Amino acid sequence: MVCKKMSMELSTSLQQIGLKAKSASAILNTASSDQKNIFFEFAIQAIQEDSDAILAANQLDIKAAQENNKDEAFIDRLALDTSRLQGICNTLAEIKLFDDPVGRVLASWDRPNGLNISRVATPLGVIGLIFESRPNVAADAGGLCLKSGNAVILRSGKDGLRSSSAIVHSLQKALKLSGLPKGCIQIVPSESREAAIMMLEGLNGSIDVIVPRGGKSLVAEVEKSAKVPVFGHLEGICHIYVDECADEQKALSVCINAKMRRTGICGAVETILIHENISQSFTPKLLAALADANCEIRCCKQTIDFDDRAIPASESDWSTEYLAPIISIKSVSNIEEAIEHIRKFGTGHTESIISEDKNMQSKFTNSIDSAIVMINTSTQFADGGEFGLGGEIGIATGKFHARGPVGIDQLTSFKYIVSGDGHIRD
């Protein structure tokens, strides 16, 4: 009986959140660019003023995660400090500077009969964001959705709920000061699975799009159960192919950065494929540098003997997103074998080729059908901020509407406006 009552209370609460978001989205749809930009000034100020409270909430989340035996990569994604809070503020400042996408004329043309037709950018409406451990997602999503004229309902995983709620509290203070409804940015005050299911069902038509941001199991469940459109990617099994025409020093620097800069992000490389013609000269240097950086190396039969710290790779390693200081290394006979490996084991996120040969670069970029394909570049650049898109609310690996970093422009749809002068159709 108690559980049934709690379920009813949760359902009522979420329905109210949905209605507030729907109402707020209608107001945002006509809000001026100036009014939206004022929000960012107040938001930065509020986060700075509330930094002690946000960091205190984060310490409670970290303590609970440690007690639940979460690994170091997970703790790193969860953790906030003064520097990362400043990073959140910097991202909000960047988002403010972007042109308002709402109302932008994407195309316009005249018909022979005198009609003028325009395709104009419009907000998606209400976005439901279901994410796991990164509290900065609350600020990034709140800022991006507001700038693009969308209301957002956030549902954090239990591990970061205190931190994310504290950030949303600051953002709602900014909304009030800028004359916008608090319903523009809301967070579900529950960690229950039932809350996520209700969001996936659309809250009686209140939610227009769901964005899952987290691990493979979360995104797979969302894509399986959602009754509204989904932007999502299952996981980031990213590859680097080191071609025989690579600059080996450049390749070494890129590979180490792509793995070790931050091992817990979806843009971290998980498998490095090395052309067999440079294996003797390049592979020992790469394995030594990785091992010296305390990275566990899992090697194929052709590469394992180059360093006694390497261990044999199993077949499952090629399809594993480690999100940790672990990497798989494989020797390939040519670029075709590298491409075939990526097609078989990749998840459509980010792949990079290291080569000075323009023909090989072109063959790789034309053959790989991932959301992001790079040349002589670390996969750690797979990030909306690094693309000049400001923050992002995820990397979409599907092929419809949004693909790659989901930033401001990807959070809009469009409508056609047809103008005439008493036109009638024969």
Image: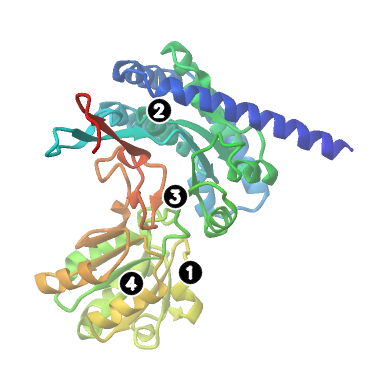
Image x and y of residue 350, in percent: 33, 61
The local secondary structure at tag 4 comes to strand
Residue under label 3: 231
Marker disc for residue 86: none
Q: Amino acid at mark 2?
A: Leu
Location of residue 237 in the rendering, given as x and y in whole percent from the top left corner: 41, 65
Q: CA distance from mark 3 to mark 2?
A: 18 Å
Q: Is residue 258 above or below residue 410?
A: below
Nearer the camera: disc 1 or disc 4: 1
Amino acid residing under circle 3: Phe
CA distance for labels 4 and 3: 28 Å
Task: Find residue 135 and report its horizontal and vertical position in percent.
Answer: 50, 38
Q: Is residue 235 left or right of residue 420?
A: right
Separation of residues labelled 2 and 1 (CA atoms): 35 Å
- Decide which of tag 3 and tag 2 comes sooner along the chain: 2
Q: Residues within 10 Å of mark 1 (few under 14, many from 20)?
A: some
Point out the tag, 2 or 4, that comes first from the N-terminus.
Answer: 2
Check the image and report above or below for 279 versus 404. below
> Element under label 3?
loop
* Mark positioned earlier in the residue sequence (1 or 4): 4
> Residue 146 has which mark?
2
Give the quarter of the figure containing the C terminus: top left
Instruction: Give amino acid for label 1.
Output: Thr
**Residue at far right of view:** 1
Do the residues under discs 1 and 3 have CB atoms within 8 angstroms?
A: no
Amino acid type assigned to the residue bearing label 4 in the image: Ile
Q: How far apart, in angstroms, are the residues tagged by discs 1 and 3?
A: 22 Å
Answer with the quarter of the image where residue 259 lies.
bottom left
Measuring 32% from the left and 79% from the top, which residue is drawn there? Answer: 340
Choose between 283 and 224: the one closer to the eye: 224
